């Protein structure tokens, strides 16, 4: 048996950490891509990043890379900065400290202090890359510690739900934003224009090497989309995330034996089936944007259903 | 009274050890070591600085790894400190403990009868033993509890009574904590630590175990559950992660295997209390609450409280949930009412108090007030509702201006103050980097009561004023703790 508040807190702890990692990956790539001289102007590039992160576009003027990186990484007044995400994750962990392992608590603390005690000045002149890498590794370490030190019971299921719901949603958004920006050319041809951007998309999901093993270094927009959306084996694809999300929801539903959980398991199963039986050519024919938007909408519905099944439900339905 | 002892063997470890007119736990008046401290003494004079550091480091690591820390307020980075502790145990002989145990059993039995009487018939008021206005002017009196039956007539399931030793070595009660006494986790943690750091001497001493406190507390709480409920659900209600005793709340919940809940996890429906779980609402039968009366139910007490549950008092009145401790038990924590405890014991049990109170002047009595105002520089003056070493004047350690200020306050509101003679509290040896030094200590045993019997695990929290010259043992003011060994024989 687990308190609803505890499930809620574990879920958000996990979502915030996933967001922190995602932001670190995108920002790392952004700075990397800006090293090469390309056609794309900085305003367009930053707006593209902001859109991928669900943030509003720049209002005016020329964005300054230093300022933007500070704002998205260290600014405590920006609730979408890496620091804010990690701080929120830590705050959540602290409220359920007796439910998570000491090792998990120590790692999230280490990660928090590492980011909090670094400033943009410390990383800007040397290697921002090293810093972002350490953030990613810090989150990976937390996930590894979680998997090997926490009982894989109901609490763990809520952590898994948060992690994979966030990831499915984020990747769908990222791919969608990218295609709207760069998919002007034929989708079934090898890209030669904006090649770095397409490699960048794969890299921002740490999927470039894995992609090459399946499709060789022949980077084609349709194959890239197929890989990031439908590949069942790679951990940073939509389908893999939805699979894990569904398994976690089913596990929570089984351990609570809650009737209300039927709705959420149905929604998760529906999304999973939509991915299992999809083919890329059909998706492209119907419009990739629509498909990805449907995924994001369904993720929101699943989130709401998780809440009404386990966390904030009407009191009188559950009195027994 | 013991004369200040002189002929103490001036071994290096004891260079800094000072004596005055207070009772010394380790050394008798003639400077000889008390028999039950002899083995500890021998250990201390043999302990090299390196050996000391090694054990101290091992102890620190044990505390840190167990997460036995408290949060320092005002640090936004959430710095956590180890609770200060001392490595020399405080030793209580079997005979001393028997007196303490009998005294506390008597006291807690009488206080529960007193609380029931106050909230029902008021015989003790009608008979003029305790003045009626004392009760109705007490800020811990809860009129909402008038006529409310509590399970097994148990008002205080858990009490932490503070006991000190005066110059003659006599144990006296300094105050009763009948509301939400804390510190028991440090009692258990200190024991765990000592068994780990000094296993051999611990084994040789024949110390009575305290490790079953969690089970005993759980059994006490279970006995309070509404009768018709089989396999009752028991929870620990905490104010939350920002409370300074949060560590203890998580620790006790784990020890007992019960859920640690906050007010927002609970709700009242049709006069039944539930907690929200992922599997739906689950009925709650007993609350071990670590939240003060004022915050328990915003419909009845402080309406700005978000730590409690709206409607809880009605559930309680209907007999659908048990609270430990009951609401309104703080009456006897009022230091003016405390002064009546010997009379209360005599009234209900027909016995003399086994453990005496500290002599206390009630300032609503004109003769006492007059005496106290004339001698304020020699006395300790305390506000009746304060604790934790706050709101008090220690006459001999105060300035003329402070004394005048306190005298003004006392005259303005005599009911709100009491005075006591300045006590020389007993000293016990404590281990520092510089060697062994004597420090002021007290003792807080934890007393469980289920309406049938009183259970006291043999021991308690010995608090110590670690700062040289300090009389205040509270952890908020530089106090620490040490393990308490009650011997088998």
Image: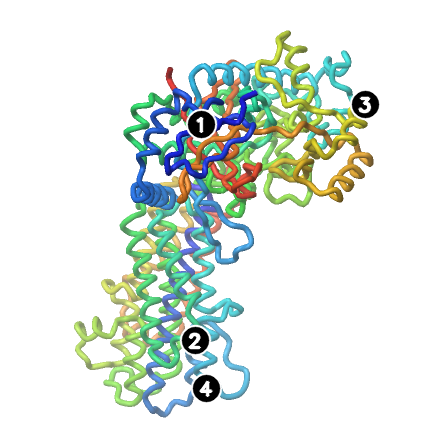
**Residue B367 disc label:** 3
**Residue A43 disc label:** 4
Position in image of residue B73 (x %, y %): 54, 51
Mark 4 vs mark 1: give the one in front: 1
Q: Are discs 2 and 4 located on one and the same chain? A: yes
Residue drawn at x 76%, y 24% is: B134
Q: SS of the residue at dot 2?
A: helix
Q: Are discs 1 and 3 located on one and the same chain? A: yes
How far apart marks 2 and 4 lie (CA) works out to 21 Å
Position in image of residue B24 (x %, y %): 49, 27
Determine contact: label 2, label 3, CB under 8 Å: no
Write down the chain letter for disc 2. Answer: A
How far apart marks 4 and 3 lie (CA) works out to 85 Å
Determine contact: label 1, label 2, CB under 8 Å: no
Which residue is denoted by mark 1 in the rendering?
A: B7
Which residue is denoted by mark 2 in the rendering?
A: A120
Q: Are discs 4 and 3 located on one and the same chain? A: no
Mark 2 vs mark 4: give the one in front: 2
Write down the chain letter for disc 1. Answer: B
Q: Are discs 1 and 2 located on one and the same chain? A: no
* Vertical side of B75 occupied by B321: above or below: above
Q: Is residue B324 visible?
A: no
Q: Residues within 10 Å of mark 2 (few under 14, many from 20)?
A: some
Residue reaching furthest top? B350
Q: Residues within 10 Å of mark 4 (few under 14, many from 20)?
A: some
Write down the chain letter for disc 4. Answer: A
């Amino acid at each position: 048996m687990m308190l609803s508040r505890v499930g809620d807190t574990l879920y958000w702890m996990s979502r915030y950490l996933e967001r922190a990692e995602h932001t670190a990956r995108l920002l790392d790539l952004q700075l990397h891509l800006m090293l090469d001289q390309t056609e794309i102007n900085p305003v367009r590039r930053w707006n593209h990043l902001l859109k991928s992160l669900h943030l509003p576009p720049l209002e005016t003027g020329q964005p300054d890379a230093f300022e933007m990186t500070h704002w998205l990484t260290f600014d405590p007044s920006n609730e979408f900065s890496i620091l804010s995400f990690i701080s929120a994750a830590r705050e959540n962990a602290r409220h359920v400290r007796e439910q998570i392992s000491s090792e998990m608590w120590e790692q999230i603390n280490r990660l928090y202090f590492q980011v909090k005690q670094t400033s943009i000045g410390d990383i800007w002149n040397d290697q921002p890359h090293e810093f972002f890498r350490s953030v990613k590794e810090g989150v990976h370490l937390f996930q590894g510690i979680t998997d090997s030190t926490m009982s894989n019971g109901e609490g763990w299921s809520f952590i898994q739900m948060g992690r994979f719901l966030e990831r499915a949603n984020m990747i769908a958004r990222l791919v969608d934003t990218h295609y709207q920006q760069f998919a002007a050319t034929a989708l079934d041809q090898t890209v030669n224009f904006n090649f770095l951007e397409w490699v960048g998309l794969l890299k921002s999901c740490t999927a470039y090497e894995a992609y090459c093993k399946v499709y060789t270094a022949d980077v084609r927009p349709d194959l890239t989309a197929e890989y990031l959306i439908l590949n069942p084996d790679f951990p940073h694809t939509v389908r893999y995330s939805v699979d894990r999300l569904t398994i976690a929801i089913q596990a929570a539903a089984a351990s609570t034996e809650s009737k209300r959980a039927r709705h959420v398991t149905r929604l998760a199963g529906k999304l999973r089936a939509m991915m299992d039986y999809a083919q890329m050519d059909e998706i492209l024919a119907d419009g990739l944007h629509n498909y990805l938007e449907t995924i994001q909408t369904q993720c929101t519905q699943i989130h709401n259903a998780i809440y009404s099944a386990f966390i904030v439900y009407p009191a009188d339905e559950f009195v027994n | 009274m013991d004369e200040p002892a002189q002929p103490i063997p001036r071994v290096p470890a004891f260079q800094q050890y000072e004596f005055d007119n207070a009772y010394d736990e380790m050394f008798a008046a003639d400077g000889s070591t008390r028999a039950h401290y002899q083995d500890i003494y021998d250990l201390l004079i043999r302990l090299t600085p390196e050996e000391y550091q090694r054990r101290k480091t091992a102890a620190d690591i044990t505390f840190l790894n167990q997460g036995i820390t408290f949060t320092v307020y005002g640090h936004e980075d959430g710095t956590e400190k180890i609770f200060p502790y001392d490595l020399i145990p405080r030793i209580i002989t079997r005979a001393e403990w028997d007196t303490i145990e009998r005294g506390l059993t008597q006291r807690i039995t009488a206080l529960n009868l007193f609380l029931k009487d106050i909230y029902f018939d008021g015989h003790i008021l009608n008979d003029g033993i305790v003045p009626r206005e004392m009760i109705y002017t007490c800020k811990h009196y809860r009129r909402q509890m008038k006529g409310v039956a509590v399970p097994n007539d148990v008002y205080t399931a858990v009490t932490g009574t503070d006991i000190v030793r005066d110059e003659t070595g006599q144990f006296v009660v300094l105050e009763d904590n009948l509301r939400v006494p804390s510190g028991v986790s440090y009692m258990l943690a200190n024991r765990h630590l000592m068994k780990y750091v000094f296993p051999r001497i611990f084994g040789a001493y024949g110390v009575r175990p305290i490790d079953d406190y969690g089970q005993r507390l759980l059994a006490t709480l279970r006995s309070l559950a509404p009768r018709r409920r089989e396999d009752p659900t028991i929870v620990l209600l905490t104010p939350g992660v920002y409370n300074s005793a949060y560590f203890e709340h998580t620790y006790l919940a784990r020890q007992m295997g019960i859920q640690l809940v906050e007010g927002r996890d609970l709700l009242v429906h049709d006069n039944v209390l539930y907690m929200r779980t992922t599997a739906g609402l689950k009925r709650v039968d007993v609350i071990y609450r670590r939240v003060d009366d004022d915050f328990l139910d915003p419909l009845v007490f402080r309406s700005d409280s978000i730590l409690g549950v709206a409607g809880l008092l009605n559930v309680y009145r209907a007999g659908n949930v048990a609270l430990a401790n009951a609401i309104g038990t703080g009456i006897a924590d009022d230091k003016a009412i405390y002064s009546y405890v010997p009379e209360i014991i005599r009234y209900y049990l027909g016995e003399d108090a086994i453990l005496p109170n500290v002599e206390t002047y009630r300032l609503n009595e004109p003769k006492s007030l007059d005496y106290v105002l004339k001698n304020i520089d020699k006395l300790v003056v305390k506000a009746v509702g304060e604790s934790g070493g706050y709101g008090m004047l220690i006459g001999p350690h105060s300035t003329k201006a402070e004394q005048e200020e306190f005298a003004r306050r006392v005259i303005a509101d005599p009911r709100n103050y009491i005075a006591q003679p300045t006590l020389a509290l007993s000293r016990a040896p404590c281990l520092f980097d510089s060697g062994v030094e004597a420090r002021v200590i007290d003792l807080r045993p934890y007393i469980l009561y289920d309406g049938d019997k009183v259970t006291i695990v043999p021991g308690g929290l010995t608090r110590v004023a670690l700062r040289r010259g300090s009389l205040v043992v509270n952890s908020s003011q530089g106090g620490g703790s040490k393990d308490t060994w009650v011997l088998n024989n």
